[in-house]
Image (cartoon, rainbow, N blue to C red):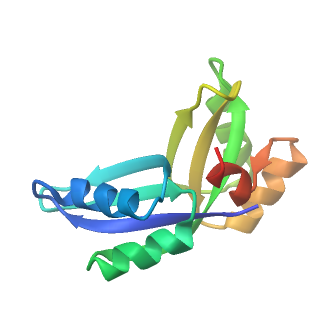
Amino acid sequence: MKIKQVSVFLENKSGRLAAVTKALAQNKLNIRALSIADTSDFGILRLIVNKPEDAYRVLKEEGFTVSIAEVIGVAMPDTPGGLADILEVLEDRGVDIEYIYAFVGSARPDALVICRVENIDDAIEVLQEKGINILSGEKVYSL
């Protein structure tokens, strides 16, 4: 139940993000979720796309510095406290979160959160023990 996330190391200058999205669009690769964290000179763009291996190849061919990481996709109630409940489960087990981002879609009643954690197998195990809905890559890629 791991999801492949594409990460792109970007210079923090005008047009770089547009170049990534244009390359993906020209190859019919659809962005399902994204997050960007930046510093003054560089940023890391994290993408969930419908075909992560294809996105990796396309962006590499375009000259971007690209990597793929495994993350967890969790469905949570789209209500106050939905995220807090999931984070409490991970905290109780001592699972450290490296980063997290969330999104909602109009076709789903739940919100979705993408988590990168230190030990992904432990996190999946503890979340499943608590009955938390972890989504497969195929499910997230097809949203």
Image side of residue 113 versus residue 61, left or right: right
The image quarter in which residue 8 lies: bottom left
Give the total number of marks visible in the rendering: 0
- Is 53 situated left or right of 66 in this image? right
In which image quadrant can residue 19 be found? bottom left
Residue, far top: 80
The residue under the point 89% across, 49% down is: 129
Q: Is residue 59 above or below residue 78?
A: below
Q: Position of residue 67 (x, y in %)?
A: 44, 75
Residue lying at 10% horizontally and 54% vertically, measured from the top left: 14
Image position, residue 141 (x, y; %): 63, 54
Q: Is residue 129 above or below residue 109?
A: below
In the shown orientation, is residue 99 left or right of residue 121?
left
Against 130, residue 9 (above or below) is below
Residue depicted at 59% across the width and 60% down the height: 117
- Quadrant housing the C terminus: top right
Q: Which residue shows up at 58% across the image and 52% down it? A: 115
The one of 116 and 45 positioned closer to us in this rendering: 45
For the N terminus, the quadrant is bottom right
Q: Position of residue 6 (x, y in %)?
A: 47, 66
In front of the other: 105 or 87: 105
Across and down, in percent, residue 12 comes to 15, 58
